[in-house]
Amino acid sequence: MIDLTQLKSRFSDNITESTFRDNHRLVVPAHTLYPVLDCLKGEYGFDTLMEVTAVDYLEYEGATDRFGVVYVLLNTTSGERLIVKTFVNLPAPQLPSAYPLWKSADWLEREVYDMFGIVFTGHPDLRRILLPAEFTAFPLRKDYPLKGIGERHNFPVITRAES
Amino acid sequence: MPLTQLDTVAPESPDQEFQWTLNFGPQHPSTHTTLRLVLTLDGERVINAVPDIGYLHSGFEKLGEHLDFNQYVTIVDRMNYISPLANEIAWHHAVEKLLDIDLTPRCKVLRTILAELMRMHDHLLNVGTTGLDLGAFTAFLYAFQQRELIYDIVEYASGQRFHTSYTRVGGVLFDVNVDWANKVRDFIKGFRPVYNEIEKLLTRNRIFIERTKGIGVLTREDAINLGATGPIARASGVVRDLRKDEPYLAYADYDFNIICSQGGDSYSRYLVRMRELLESVKIIEQAIENIPAGPVNIDAISDIVLPAKPAVYRSIEGLIQHFEVLMPNRGYPVPHEEIYAATESPNGELGFYIVGDGTVRAYRARTRPPSYVHFAIFPHIIRGHQLSDVVAVLGSINIIAAELDR
Amino acid sequence: MAVGLPENVFLTQLDAAANWARSNSLWPMPFATACCGIELMATAASRHDIARFGAEVMRFSPRQCDLLIVAGRVAMKMLPVLQRIWLQMPEPKWCISMGACACTGGVFDTYAVVQGCDRFIPVDLYVPGCPPRPEQLLAALIEMQSKIKQTGTLMGGEFDRRTTSTGPAPFDLDELRRSREMQPLVNLEIYTPPSLEDAVKAGPRRD
């Protein structure tokens, strides 16, 4: 576990640090996310962004915010991992993009936008990646049903005689 | 760009007249499943390649929120379908970390052997299809014959040759016996000659070398910044392998090397995979001689593992435990916590981010798919190469569409 | 006076000759999307050799094939591509739906997977399994060959009679109910299955 006391004292907002099993986690408020990530990359040497993902806490017991966005960072020279988490809410959930820091954020953030609707400002090309561009809903939100609302049936039927 | 619009709207006019757009469509001759590339070409040279994915998106992660930890393993199987057991091992590795379960030594060794067999499975397919895409059909047939033997081994253990759903929380579905170990030994003994054959066909083959050497170079800094892991990163000089850096299962007990290269081109990636096949053979040889005795599932009276069927039918404790695990309003306690855990799958770092909410269903089961991150690297490494190199490079970065799209 | 025919002359119907030729050289169009695609490749590999049945010519161009094998789940985004490929194939053409996902959607009853390609493509043969073993696919191929031999015609007239879709209707009432699981349903009309007399009156299906 690396020592983050300097980081916490610099960004004296409520940054909470915790460990669970062997995950070292940080929770930062959304407005300090980009400076914290920048500092982690520059000074602490976290040179790879492994994963950007989001969780919809609509049905979670004891949740205070709607969406949690999680960044998993890795330092390839020392093997240290760090998980940085932040929270955003409806309407118009928005976060600064991590693309200027790590290029792997490109597609990872596009998927978070596609599935949850969280907009990343400063992203070079934020459009839907896994779903068709005409799709309107955000499927991984908890208020979207598993079987969809009819999009998968909305296609023309071809019979044998006409094809 | 949605596919349906292309025949009603004229393609975007290129900046200069000599550029033209080619759609390397979702259905294409190279065996790399459903992905689409919109290539902007200058004659035969690629100027830009814009990937368009999602043609196999099936809602895996949404399904994970509706299925049990043991039921979801059937779905996770179908992600990297070239090495199904590797996904299952990764999924249950994450679940067992969340539940703080320590596996029995026998289970660890068994899972290690299966993970290495799956690594061979994946690398054999990749080497075979790289050969196939470049015209070497015989290497493909040799590789597939060896994969059929691995299918036989896996079928002997679990009953299904392909999507095994073999691992469970706290253990595996069935235990193995001496016959199975003999099958594995026979396979390993017969593998070396076939490996030499494939090596003779491809490694020093002038056509193969000219088509892959210097093609699709990924520098070390780019590999780190773009999040590459696994054989691709190791072929670019990133010395990182989760089996050595964050040992899990029984890897700490075995003596093996990590294969790295400094070339970063498709030929290096091929060589790294070929040598990793031999390292896997080394690990399996060590592991198969020393499978510890003992139970394969954890503590038989816990409320996480299904009891053996004779106990269910003949003793009241077995019956109660069966109900405790399976009935919908029961199940085992799961912490209200989140965890990220990764394993070294044959393709790279396959990680799962699981949010537990107290019930046996994950609240959020996110997969960190190596193929997804690697396909984002593709436009960076294909620039300036020719159209026929697109196929070679696509093969060398081993994109599995189901892991890409989930 | 009977004329003895030499051994290399056969008397047959044009239909039977055409069927024999077509069924023994079915060139598949592998529409391999997912895991079933790997089992299709394994069927083409050396242990379960599909070349024994004349079907090893897996041309990836629809213009050169006559058997579309939909192997793997068909996602929502992929369905227009599948339909376009089906329309591009020249006559006579047949379709095998391989695997549970192509037949009915399989394990993936989600927002993004089409619940069976037969909803939108005419299918001739279904192969169950997840994935079907190569032996199962070969059995399906043999079944397809016998189907062509029994019902095929030289000019392909048997296809014109199949004017209705044989898959489930796109918007079943039950399907609507299931897809709206999050909201309570009110004022639904009561669904009555067709009665036995109606089915008898309609007679056996002839498509």
Image (tube, rainbow, N blue to C red):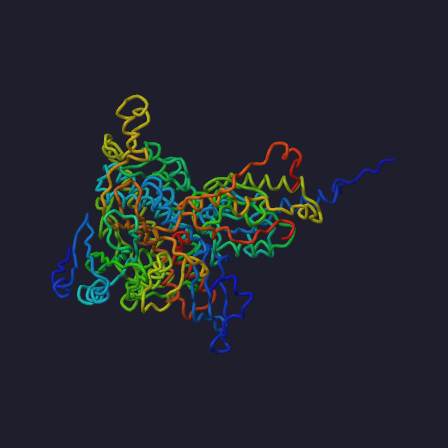
* Residue B238 percent location from the top left of the image: 27, 60
In this orientation, which residue lies closer to the viewer: C77 or B294? C77
Quadrant in which residue B293 is drawn: top left
Towards the viewer: B406 or C20: B406
In the depicted structure, whether residue B294 falls above or below residue A144: above
In this rendered view, identify the residue nearer to me: B374 or B153: B374
Q: How far across and how far down the image is residue B202, in percent? A: 42, 56
Residue lying furthest top: B314
Residue B228 sits in quarter = bottom left
| Residue nearest the viewer, comparing A153 with C81 | A153
Q: Residue furthest bottom?
A: B16
Q: Residue at x 30, y 29 (%)?
A: B322
Against B370, is B179 above or below? above
Q: Number of callouts in the render?
A: 0
Residue plotted at (35% across, 46% down): B64
- Expressed as whole percent of the image width and height from the top left, the position of residue A11 reads 15, 65
Please report the residue visible at 27 percent of the width from the left and 67 percent of the height from the top: A101
Quick check: C105 above or below B299? below
User: In the rendering, at what x and y percent does residue B125 appear?
Assistant: 41, 50
Of all residues, the one furthest to the front in this rendering is: C187
Left or right of residue B333: residue B183: right
